[in-house]
Image (spheres, rainbow, N blue to C red):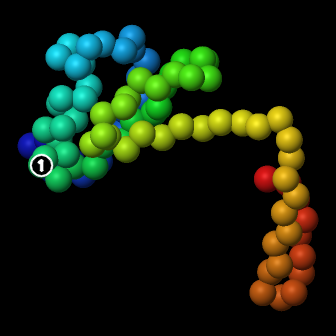
């Protein structure tokens, strides 16, 4: 943290420890207190219910999929329309 870092991005898979054994949440709180943005993957686990970085000072991100398609239309400034799926 002494080298001027602005962002810490974490994507690691660990077992969910008790709060006093968590090697991620407490050091990240120190980083946030020093003005560093901390982001972490919600989990690196195939289980749909998994959340491994739940500390409220960490911005937790995740990705997901659904089993259906949604149509979308984009109209460009020249009037051309592009249709696709989200």
Helix, strand or loop at disc 1? Answer: loop
The residue positioned farthest toward the left in the image shown? 2
Question: 9 or 24: which is nearer to us?
Answer: 24
| Rendered view: 24 above or below 73 | above
Q: Residues within 10 Å of mark 1 (few under 14, many from 20)?
A: few
Left of 35 or right of it: where is 83?
right
Residue that badge 1 annotates:
34
Q: For residue 85, what is the image quadrant?
A: bottom right
Q: Looking at the rendering, which quadrant does residue 52 occupy?
A: top left
- Position of 12 relative to 3 (above/below): above
State the residue at coordinates (28%, 49%).
37
Residue at 82 percent across and 72 percent down: it is: 74
Does 25 sit left or right of 9 as displayed? left
Residue 23 coordinates in the image, percent (x, y)? 23, 20
In the image: residue 17, left or right of residue 11? left
At horizontal 90% and vertical 65% (from top left) the residue drawn is 83
Give the tally of numbered discs: 1
Residue 19 located left or right of residue 1: right
């Amino acid at each position: 943290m002494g080298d001027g870092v602005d962002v810490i991005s974490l994507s690691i898979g660990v077992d969910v420890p008790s709060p006093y054994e968590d090697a991620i949440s407490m050091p990240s709180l120190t980083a946030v207190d020093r003005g560093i943005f901390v982001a972490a993957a919600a989990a690196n686990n195939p289980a749909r219910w998994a959340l491994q970085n739940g500390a409220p000072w960490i911005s937790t991100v995740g990705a997901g999929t659904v089993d259906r398609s949604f149509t979308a239309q984009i109209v460009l400034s020249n009037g051309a329309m592009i249709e696709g799926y989200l």
